[in-house]
Image (cartoon, rainbow, N blue to C red):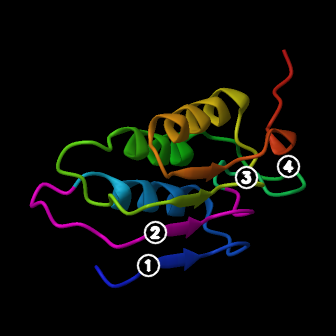
């Protein structure tokens, strides 16, 4: 849909499968069409499989797909309009938080909200 400009799914139990689906939707489109999506809010959705009480099975798979799709911006891009991505409150590990921030620093006009205080900490 090229007319949708904002999607806010905060606290909608999107989960890992939803994260993967949004990641795939943000990837470059080979036919050259572009989405007008400017804001995507996926905060507090257990995108890594863990809810706010650390219940569930942890996986990076979903947020990794989102991060990789953002990194692929540049040529033949499907969504060059994205200005805001909010993935706060999803127990995202520190290395992926850093990856999201690095992508935002590279892309002028893109803001990525990801908070380190909500990071999943594994025990060694």
Q: Which residue is mark 3?
A: 90
Residue segment shown in magenta:
29-46
Tell me if mark 4 has few (under 14), some (14-19) or many (20+) residues whose alpha carbon lies within 10 angstroms of its own.
few
Q: Which label belongs to residue 5?
A: 1
In the displayed orientation, state which residue is furthest to the right: 53
Q: Which of 117/46 is in front?
A: 117
Earlier along the polypeptide chain: callout 4 or callout 3? 4
What residue appears at the point 57 percent right and 58 percent down from the top-left corner? 85
- For the residues labelled 3 and 1, the Cα–Cα distance comes to 23 Å
Which of discs 4 and 2 lies nearer the camera? The answer is 2
Which of discs 1 and 4 lies nearer the camera? The answer is 1
Earlier along the polypeptide chain: callout 1 or callout 2? 1
Quadrant location, the N terminus: bottom left
What residue appears at the point 80 percent right and 37 percent down from the top-left corner? 120
- Where is 57 relative to 121, above or below? below
Dominant secondary structure of the residues highlighted in magenta in the image: loop
Q: Which residue is mark 2?
A: 38
Mark 3–mark 1 CB contact (< 8 Å): no
- For the residues labelled 1 and 4, the Cα–Cα distance comes to 32 Å
Q: Secondary structure at mark 4?
A: loop
Q: Quadrant of residue 94?
A: top right
- For the residues labelled 1 and 2, the Cα–Cα distance comes to 5 Å
Q: Which of 79/96 is in front?
A: 79
Tell me if mark 3 has few (under 14), some (14-19) or many (20+) residues whose alpha carbon lies within 10 angstroms of its own.
many
Mark 1–mark 2 CB contact (< 8 Å): yes
Q: Secondary structure at mark 1?
A: loop
Q: Which residue is mark 4?
A: 54
- Asked if the stretch drawn in magenta spans residue 12, the answer is no
């Amino acid at each position: 849909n090229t007319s949708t400009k904002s999607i806010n799914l905060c606290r909608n139990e999107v989960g890992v499968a939803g994260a993967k689906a949004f990641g795939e939707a943000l990837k470059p489109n080979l036919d050259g069409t572009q989405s007008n999506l400017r804001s995507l809010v996926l905060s507090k959705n257990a995108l890594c499989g863990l809810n706010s009480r650390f219940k569930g099975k942890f996986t990076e798979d979903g947020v990794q797909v989102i991060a990789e799709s953002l990194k692929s911006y540049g040529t033949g891009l499907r969504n060059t309009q994205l200005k805001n991505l909010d993935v706060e409150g999803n127990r995202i590990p520190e290395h992926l938080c850093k990856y999201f921030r690095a992508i935002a620093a590279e892309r002028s006009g893109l803001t990525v909200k990801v908070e380190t205080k909500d990071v999943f900490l594994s025990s060694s």
